[in-house]
Amino acid sequence: MSNIMIVIVAFIVGCGSVMDSFETYQPLIACSLIGLFGGHPVSGLLLGGELQMIALGWANVGAAMSPDAGLAGVASAIILLKSGGATSNVGTAIGLAIPLAVAGLFLTMLVRTVTVFIVHIQDHAAEEGKILPIEIWQFIGLSLQGLRVAIPAALLLALPTSVVQSGLNMMPKWLSDGMTLSGGMVVAVGYAMIMNMMSTNDVWPFFAIGFVIAALSKLTLIAIGTLGLAFTLIYLQLLNNGGGNGGSNGSSDSKSAGNSGTGDPLGDILDNY
Amino acid sequence: MAETAQNNENSKRITLTKGDRRRVWFHSWFILANFNYERMQNSGVCYTMIPAIRKLYKNKEDRAEALQRHLTFFNTHPYLASPIFGVTMALEEEKANGADIDNSAIQGVKVGMMGPLAGVGDPLFWFTLRPIIFSLGASLAISGSFIGPILAFVLWNLIHLVFTYYTQEFGYNTGMKITEDLSGSLLHNVTHGASLMGMFVIGALIQRWVSIKFTWVYARPKVNGHVHPMTLQNSLDQLIPGLAGLLLTFLCMWLLKKKVSPIVIIIGIFVVGVAAHCAHII
């Protein structure tokens, strides 16, 4: 019964990872659900949280593709369950998630190529003015993405537990410990991807302040986020004021913002939020 | 007199009701479902427009033309497609009621909007909002709280559904004017503010979550007869905690700019990490 639920979750994760709509495929959610249905909710939750930190910067932008967080989360959570579900195995499961994410990427590319044929079938339906076949084939394409994760998940579940366990036991301690430590460093790649996308000159002071403030270990992330929002609002207010008075960098955008404002820049900014 | 003429006009006019527009909104959640390498989101766009097409065009020729019109290449951010659907619905409605709008005009509006809007959506949703919301959830999860995944799921979808619904309505109501509005100062302030806030939070996240612990002891001086092992980690922490993680992130940024694939970097970190662990450096 729990295996059926896990395969259903895997199918939903596969659909979610192509749609990017409800974000059910994010490891935080996928691993937690599999842990829950597999009877080891806390281990699933911890794996989900750790894996999520690694996958934060993974995003499909334009036609470029990132490692597949969906298959990585599902498969590593199943392996974690099979190995007994102890929280001490979370580190090893994270190490295994990375090659799985790469494997998932190739499977996604395969399905995205297969769907080209679906589009040609839809073209024929469109020529005839038929609506229903287009809708049906849309969901057949989606199901293929679901199966892309559900089939590997079912195969992993079908493997005898002893095989998975002995496979994991064969892994020497230096390797699993080293992989756990590397998992803490791999997070940096995701952040680097985000930063390369966003870096302009005026964001760097914000980055520096955020980094230094986080070293105050008593502040929670919510407190830090609030500070960040406050700094941003203050900065935008000053920027728009300066532009409106015809001073500062002369950025055309800030000028128009200042001029079109109602003389209450903070109010304008708050309205914008 | 003029008013009665207009009433007659209105009685024949097919309009997309709030219900029709809501159906289009439901369909728009599936815009990426049949993503393909040939025409990307085309199948999703056609699927999304189907409730409107069904309502507006009753005969086979018109339907065929409309379906084919929306099966052409399309690719943008899945949430920022919503204002485009709004505008496209407004155009289709005018066309169905006899306005002189040809295929290429509708195509032009769609293609003209998809590029700039993708440029807004990627940094706003994928690189700011998602890292913030999901790192918040993940940090709660790591501390053992089930609120983490629930909070992230609810918060994300609340924002995403409210955003897509209202921008679609906004697109429908403003029609063609939307491109001017969106290039205006409001959107600029929101995206600029989001990237500032995003970088602030990423700075904090790197400090908290990129973990490198050096165990390497480089000196064992004796003070008052006790051995005080000096680890590299202690010395770095005295500069600022988290410095090693920061430097690693900068290295990754540099490698990515040199067009090294992220997958290669990830595998490289694993290899170096395991090797360094074996050499007792970390």
Image: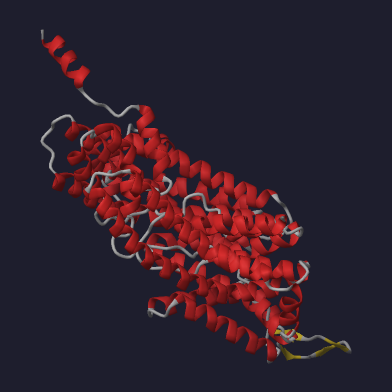
Q: Nearer the viewer, residue B158 or A258?
A: B158
Residue B152 position, x and y percent, is 59, 50
**Res. A35 image quadrant:** bottom right
Placement of the C terminus of chain A among the 4 image quadrants: top left
Q: Does residue A140 lie above or below A94 as drawn?
A: above
Q: How is the image coloured?
A: secondary structure
Judge from the rendering whether residue A53 lies leftward or rightward of residue A111; answer left or right: right
Q: Nearer the viewer, residue B183 or B38?
A: B38
Residue B182 position, x and y percent, is 29, 43
Q: Does residue A144 lie above or below B13 as drawn?
A: below
Q: Nearer the viewer, residue A53 or A113?
A: A113
- Residue farthest to the top, as pictured: B1
Residue at 33% of width from left, 53% of height from top?
Answer: B43
Residue B96 position, x and y percent, is 19, 33
Placement of the N terminus of chain A among the 4 image quadrants: bottom right
Q: Does residue A142 lie above or below B170 as drawn?
A: below
**Res. B257 image quadrant:** bottom left
Residue at 59% of width from left, 62% of height from top?
Answer: A52
Q: Nearer the viewer, residue A156 or B147?
A: A156
